[in-house]
Image (tube, helix red, strand yellow):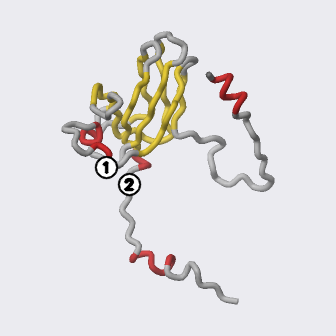
Amino acid sequence: YRIAQEFRHPLRLHVALGEPGDLPPTFSPVQVESDNVVISAFFREMRDSAKGQPHHAADELGMDYPFVLRLVELNGQRATARLTFGATLGGAIRTNLLGEPEEVLVAPGKEGREIALAMRPHEIATIYLDLVEGRKQVRDLDGRREVWATVHRTEP
């Protein structure tokens, strides 16, 4: 799978000339360390997508917009996937495909940046995440009116 993906999507390098600024040399929201486990999806879900479900991982995490990470074991072998996150984990719950909790990986309120996940052969694992730096923030547009109300005005 990895070789096929590297062939289909070759690495492209862009070199910018000038001062590098204060950005880190590399950034990834999540990295998986395993030869036979890959990330197949990483997205944000709305709490409303679980309407009608009596128990959902978003309830356990206390979030309306949890991050969802899906992993797949491809080689038909047991594996341990070590996940390293670029943000602080405020909670992580392994779920079934419907988002119903199966196992607490990082208890809500505890913090960390790594998870070790045991995978069965050909397993698809779904993890709901509370990434502290990615939590929804309420923004008051009226409090920033001087910015957005004048953005289209230009002086000749």
Residue at 59 percent of width and 84 percent of height: 153
- Picture coordinates of residue 122, whole percent (x, y): 47, 16
Depth check, mark 2 against mark 1: the one in front is 1
Question: Which residue is identified by label 1?
Answer: 64
Nearer to the camera, 146 or 4: 4
Is 13 drawn above or below residue 80 in the view shown? below
Q: Which residue is drawn at 75% across and 40% down?
A: 12
Establish if 63 lies above or below 128: below
Badge 2 vs badge 1, beta-carbon distance below 8 Å: yes
Mark 1: which secondary structure?
Answer: loop
Which mark, by number, is residue 29?
A: none
Per the image, label 2 sits on a secondary structure element best described as loop
Return the residue at label 2. 136
Of mark 2 and mark 1, the one earlier in the sequence is: 1
Residue 123 in which image quadrant: top left
Amino acid at circle 2? Lys
Quadrant location of the N terminus?
Answer: top right
Report the residue at 57% width, 39% height from top.
28
Check disc 1 and give the amino acid type. Asp
Q: How many labels sit on residues?
A: 2
Answer with left or right where residue 48 lies relative to residue 74: left
Residue ranking furthest to the top:
77
Q: Is residue 90 left or right of residue 43?
A: left
Where residue 151 sits: x, y (%)?
Answer: 56, 78
Q: Quadrant of residue 144?
A: bottom left
Q: Quadrant of residue 21?
A: bottom right
Crowd class of label 1 (few under 14; some 14 to 19; many from 20; radius 10 Å): some
